[in-house]
Amino acid sequence: MASTATAQDAEGGLRLVFGIEERLEYGRNLALAVPAEGSTASAATTLSFGLYSSTPLDRLEFTASAALLVENAPDTDGTVTEFARPRLGFSYTREVPNAVFGIDLSYIRDDVDSLAEDLEDADATGTETDYGVALRFETGRTTPASFFVTAAHEVTEYEDTTDPDLIDTTTTSLEAGTRLRFSEVLTGTVSLEFSREDEDGAPDTTDTLTAAFGLEHALANGSASLDLTHSTEDGGEDRTTITLGRTLELPAGTLAARLGLSRSDLGGTDLVGGLDWSQRLPDGGVTVSLERSTSYDSDDGETTVDTALSVEWTHEINALSSLAADASWALSDAASERIEETGLGVTYRTALTRDWELASGLRYIWRDDADGHAESPMVFVSLGRSFTLRP
């Protein structure tokens, strides 16, 4: 049995990971409503499970978690208890020198504001359910030109919402392309992607065709890249984006910068890009991220420019405890509405025993939009542990 365990460890083997966490949370106006709502108190007991298997050719992951939530909030009738926040994930990858195949499945159900991908939905109410499947296959990876294809099917559903813009959506996409290896330091990618978006209740679907071309040159201290994309939306906009990128390997960190132009035949030309910087410190680290992007809404007939800045700092107090602080600022600027949101947070973690960890912290969010000004302070404390079994 000892020799078998050693062999499994060398190859990755099979691991079962179990986790439990109890989180107590208290906050005011968590929905960022205008006028401000009352306070919310909640206790969530979260159980999680993970199965991980790895061999020289295969990698498999299965994760599942859910919470027993006891909550008293402005939108509940007193204190309620419910089964909440289920999450499921499955991933399998098989890789040989000349080819790779992968499949990913996911399911998640949570509050809309917790799953919001843009600033407009960050203060929305209701429940969101996301699930989907993605496939990828590539062959000829040891040749000068390999071929790859990816396919995805994603569904988003909403319940108990008040925002009419939150509509059930089904998106299906298919992408095919080739990776070109011109030399040991210069590679390129050419691809063509078709996607179809179907909104519940809409008479027609929205079809988008995107062509992409990219070059990447490896350098002694990083890499340089050029990316060009052109997308055509059926009955909508045509958008062309060109971006130059540069990554640098620093003595104790990394720096990645992107700068480009995005032009829409309906919305004009805007500057896009981003900056990611991470620096290791003797007792922690700091990361900074800046992103600027633009999009055009055919339904509203307007361009939205999104800008986001985030800073994170970590400090190792000693071998058992650490402190983390973060600050974020985001701006969504459109003709119909200007949304600005700022957040500050601090978290302290300490190991009570070899297995148990205690975490506590606070967060404060300010938001300004068409409805007015909203503020939301929140404090939390959590106690949890995880343990691993190797069959």
Image (cartoon, rainbow, N blue to C red):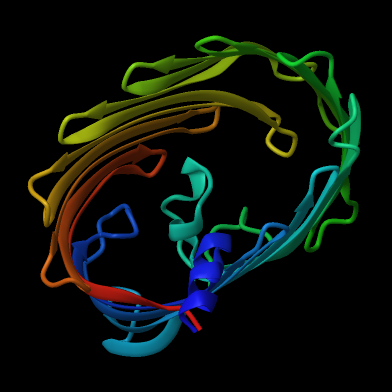
Residue 22: quadrant of the picture: bottom left
Residue 304 location (% of width, % of height): 58, 28
Residue 45 location (% of width, % of height): 31, 82
225, above or below 49, in the image: above
Extreme residue in the front direction: 3
Looking at the image, residue 169 sits to the left or right of residue 3; the answer is: right
Pick whichever, 215 or 301, lies toward us: 215
Residue 203 location (% of width, % of height): 89, 56
Which residue appears at 61% of the width and 25% of the height?
294
Q: Is residue 86 visible?
A: no
Residue 235: quadrant of the picture: top right
Looking at the image, residue 149 sits to the left or right of residue 50; the answer is: right
Pick whichever, 40 or 4, lies toward us: 4
Pick whichever, 292 or 52, lies toward us: 52
350, above or below 100, in the image: below
Instruction: Report the number of discs.
Output: 0
181, above or below 287, in the image: above
Extreme residue in the left direction: 318
Which residue appears at 84% of the width and 32% of the height?
236
Q: Is residue 267 visible?
A: yes
Which residue appears at 50% of the width and 44% of the height?
120
Residue 241: quadrant of the picture: top right
Residue 383 location (% of width, % of height): 19, 73
Pick whichever, 263 or 390, lies toward us: 390
